[in-house]
Image (tube, grey):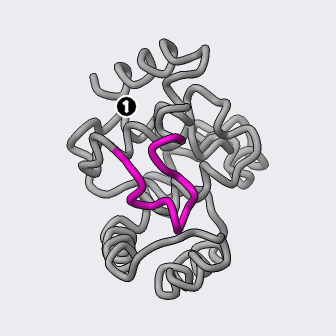
Amino acid sequence: MSKSERERFAKAKSVEAFINGADRKKKSRDPVEDALAFYRRHGKKAEGLPKAPMTKAARTALKADIQNLAEVANRRYSDVTPFEVKDEQKLAMEHFELACWLSWFMETPGGRDDVAVGALIIFLLFENGFNKPTYEFHTLTGFGERSFDNILERDEGDDVIDELNKLVK
């Protein structure tokens, strides 16, 4: 038993509590709250993005969609030029975790109505240099300029800004 385990055992209320790990701090089951807590702790010094709450299969499908973006555009009845396809592919590969978050945001029922989620998405966009997002990830994720505007134009726009201020401090 390591020193830290011995200390945990000494503090545990019972052997059963120690075995079950009842004394350990548990991560919340809310990935958005985990990501917000990550940024509140580390601020702008954070390296990389926390992982989006997607399954491995969804991540694999998103990677395949990046490679076949022209086909995705046809499936979604979207008119894109070969130049736009290459540009979006490049951005999606460079900012894959951001693309995962945007995809999750657009596909999660109720996610677009949550103030904390909206603040996190805006924060992640800004942190990745997308200060004026347009349609960089639209073909792939469905997130575009209108989606960005909707986050701030709802009734809770002031609450989103308050949450953003907490993240930036």
Q: Quadrant of residue 83?
A: bottom left
Count of labels in the image: 1
Left-right relation of 88 to 31 = left
**Between 62 and 7, which is closer to the camera in this rendering?**
62
Q: Which residue is mark 1?
A: 40
At horizontal 49% and vertical 25% (from top left) the residue drawn is 152
At horizontal 52% and vertical 55% (from top left) the residue drawn is 101
Q: Which residues are magenta?
A: 133-146
At horizontal 70% and vertical 42% (from top left) the residue drawn is 22
Left-right relation of 89 to 57 = left
**Between 94 and 39, which is closer to the camera in this rendering?**
94
Q: Please, is residue 75 above or below residue 14 in the view?
A: below
List x then y, in percent, for residue 115. 58, 26
The amino acid type of the residue labelled 1 equals Arg
List x then y, in percent, for residue 69. 50, 80
Q: Identify the secondary structure beneath mark 1.
A: helix
List x then y, in percent, for residue 35. 48, 43
In magenta segment, residue 139? yes
Q: Please, is residue 81 above or below residue 129 in the view?
A: below
Callout 1: few (<14), some (14-19), or many (20+) C-alpha neighbours within 10 Å? Answer: some
Q: Please, is residue 154 above or below residue 136 in the view?
A: above
